[in-house]
Image (cartoon, rainbow, N blue to C red):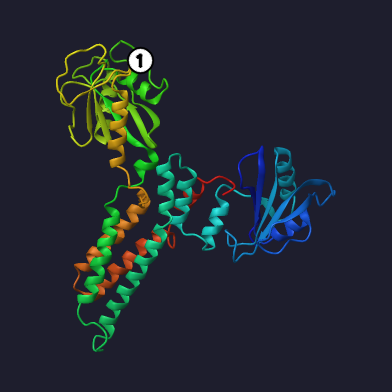
Amino acid sequence: MKDTIFALSSGAPPAAIAVIRVSGAKALRALEQLAGAAPAPRTMSLRTIRNPETGEVLDRGLIAVFPAVTSVTGEPLAELHLHGSRAIVEAVENVLAGMEGVRRARAGEFTWRAFENGRIDLVQVESLSDLLRAETESQRRAAMAEEGLSGEVERWRGALLHLSALVEAALDQSDEDDVPTDRTEIDRIGSRLAAVIGSMLDRPGAERLFDGIRVVFAGPPNSGKSTLINALSGREVAITSPIAGTTRDVIEAPVKLGGVAFVLTDTAGLRAESGDPIERIGIERAHRRIEEADLVVWMDDGPPPHDEAAKVIRIFPRADERRVRASADELPVSAVTGEGLAALTHLLIERGRALLPREGEVALSRRQREHLSRCHASLAEFQNESDELIAAEHLRQARQALDELTGRAGTEEMLDALFATFCVGK
């Protein structure tokens, strides 16, 4: 029998209220030892909470019980709503920890049991994880939308099962009048499903939304990159100096601008020759970051390396010191006087939002995209395969990819890594 687990599921004390959850076969017994006979399921009841060994009163609070069929974990669940002082929480937890077969929960264990007992699938687990780490309104909305992906995947899986049934029928019962003997209907369903999944794959992913849009500030030495990043981030994240070549390594500053998460990256000044081997390494790293960037703020009159117009923002830096712009499309900016900072911020937000999923739209994580891409590729193979036996195998592979997406099939290592990101109370 599994251990019964408990944890504080509300915020860390001190707080107005502290909620302790107990989940497992001995949850009801543990509650009764603390507070007497349990109330009716899903009903709050005011009780005196006592140490069952000494009879000492620990608190007065609300209790509730949830049968396994209706609980969030799929196991008998009890809740104690206590006054949120550290002393009360610690006293109640110590009593629970002393009960036979009852222990403190590990990180993510409540959610793991919900997943294991079929209350939620892996996509919903990831949605909850994203919701818990959301720091911007866009991240919160994306996490809420992600939960709807489970329903979409289940519908796709149902369509694949229907397709498989039609293919099997075409193989085994092709002489029956009510079973399609050609691929017309099968191809129509397959094409429609492939188009829907393909449309989902074409949307921007979730990485930029949660990890931040990567903005690289690049240009020659002493062009003011570090000073500008400090001004935009509102704190001293990079060392500034009039000495050319001060920045030799990549420095990153996570910021939020207009509700959008960015990672501003300071790089070594770019120049053709350098006698300093450490500076040369910094320049090589700068070139790599420019290639990988979502946006590049270019701070020089000449053309930037890897010039991709879609991701380059050309500015005229140190506008308080310089006078002549090489091009009219350069935005004059001065981190010293503040000139152009608002315009640059607005431009970053505008260009950044264009790289993010639309509000309320499901944004796939890297893992979700990988499995959905495999499903889409198997569907493409199915559509191009004339041999019905091989076509049926492609459909099986497409279903397998969806099962791995939702966690019907998967590796223990991946699951362990995901659930370890949760707090103890989840």
Mark count? 1
Residue 277 position in % (x across, y down): 27, 18
85 is higher (above) or lower (below) than 203? above
Out of 253 and 417, give the one closest to the viewer. 253
Please state which amino acid type lies under the numbered disc 1: Thr
Q: Is residue 413 visible?
A: no
Q: Secondary structure at mark 1?
A: loop
Image quadrant in which you'd find residue 320:
top left
Residue 375 position in % (x across, y down): 30, 61
Residue at x 76% of width, y 58% of height: 32
138 is higher (above) or lower (below) than 67? above
Out of 221 and 412, give the one closest to the viewer. 221
Quarter of the rendering occupied by the N terminus: bottom right
5 is higher (above) or lower (below) than 395? above
Residue 75 position in % (x across, y down): 61, 62
Image quadrant in which you'd find residue 2:
bottom right
Out of 300 and 320, give the one closest to the viewer. 320
- In the displayed structure image, the side of residue 208 where residue 305 appears, left or right: left
- In the displayed structure image, the side of residue 234 where residue 113 appears, left or right: right
Residue at x 67% of width, y 41% of height: 16
- How many residues crowd mark 1 within 10 Å: few (<14), some (14–19), many (20+)? some
Residue 340 position in % (x across, y down): 28, 22
Residue at x 37% of width, y 42% of height: 209
278 is higher (above) or lower (below) than 39? above
- In the displayed structure image, the side of residue 159 where residue 129 appears, left or right: right
Residue, disc 1: 240
Q: Is residue 42 visible?
A: yes
